[in-house]
Every structure is written in structure tokens, then in C-alpha cells.
Amino acid sequence: MSYQPPQQPGQPGQWGPQQPYQQPPPGYHPPPPPPRRSAQTGVWIGVLVVVVLALAIGFAVVRSSDSGDAPDLTDPSGPVPHYTVLIKDLKARTGNVELLVPDATIPGAQDVIRSYSKLFNRGEGMEKVDITVVRSETSKVYVCSGRWLKDGRASELYTGGDFTADRWPAIRMNCPDPDGPSPGTPALP
């Protein structure tokens, strides 16, 4: 683009003809500023804020008192057997964990699963974790397996809504224990 001298008023320029500055007509007054809010408007805003805060606090109280009425199904039912983590494959939102409990019984394995799932109840972003309990590192079968889900949205996403619960997070367990002691067989020391 080459240099262009400044345009004179009234001559066509790069953006159309330039208009010369015009003085406002005599007696012209600019429009008045918008009206200020009255003190009454401020009062109504304050009342609205107080009502919203009261509703939020009331909702929080109802939610917290609701959570204490029903037993937590993710709590272990007794003392938790000692376990060792064999496999811990956790991704951003899902994961698989395999736990070793050498002398696992079905109730003990369920307690281990419930206890371990508490790690995910802290809101660390996990939505679905499969937790399996085995008796040995080389075992091809498991004593119990539990699927922990964070909420109903995770259930829809990962199970198509087949996993339902009254309270979230929840665990669904499967404990076939095919290698467990048969009835009448004495336990090994």
C-alpha cells in the first residue's frame, strides 16, 4: 500500500466521505443519565440473597441428616483381614484392583472389598472400580469380586443402568468361591 495524503473534509476517503464536525444546535441538551436505583430495590436484593442462603443451608441440613439414618453398605461388617495389593490399575475414572488374602473366607473377602472401596469414597474422581480378592498370586479363580460405582450416572455409563442402588456410592458383589473349603472339611492351621 502506498502513502496517501490526508483527506480534506468532504472528500471521499478510504472509508467513504468524511463528515465535517457539526456544532450541536442551540438549546440542545444531552439526554439525562439513567435513573439510579432506589433504596427499596437494594432492600429487595438483600432479601433475595437471605432467602437463597436460607434455602441452601436448609437443603444441606436435610442432606446431612438423611445420610445418618440408613446404614452405610460400604462399611465392613467386622474386623478386616490383612490384605496385599497385587494389581492396582487405576485410570482417570475407572480401575481394577486385585487383593491377596491368603486365608480368605467369603465374609472376610467382602469386608476387604468394602474397606478398600473407602479409598474411592473420598471423591478422588473415580467412577467405577472392580475389586477382586484372591487367595494366592497364581490363583486363576477369585473368592469375591466387587464392583464399586460412584453414582447413578456412573451406573448408566458403565452398566447401562443395570446396577441400581438406594444410596451411592454402592458396591455389587459376586462371591462364587469355587476353591473354598467344602462342608465338613477341617480348616488347615
Image: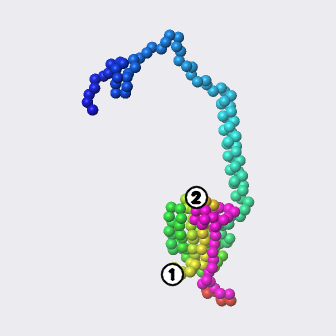
Instruction: Please identify the dominant SS of the magenta region.
Output: loop
Residue 88 picture location, percent across and down: 51, 69
The residue labelled by disc 1 is 138
Residue at x-position 37% and y-position 27%: 15
The residue nearer to you, when weighing 160 against 10, is 10
| Quarter that holds the N terminus | top left
- Give above or below for 177 relative to 5: below
The residue sitting at 26% across, 28% down in the picture is 3
Q: Picture quarter containing residue 84?
A: bottom right
Within 10 Å of the Cα at label 2, are there few (<14), some (14-19), or many (20+) other Cα atoms? few
Dot 2 or dot 1: first in sequence order is 2
Which residue in the protein does label 2 denote? Answer: 123
| Extreme-bottom residue of the structure | 185
Please count the marks in the image: 2
Please tell me whether residue 168 belongs to the stretch shown in magenta: yes
User: What's drawn in magenta, residue-wise?
Assistant: 156-183
- The residue sitting at 65% across, 26% down in the picture is 38
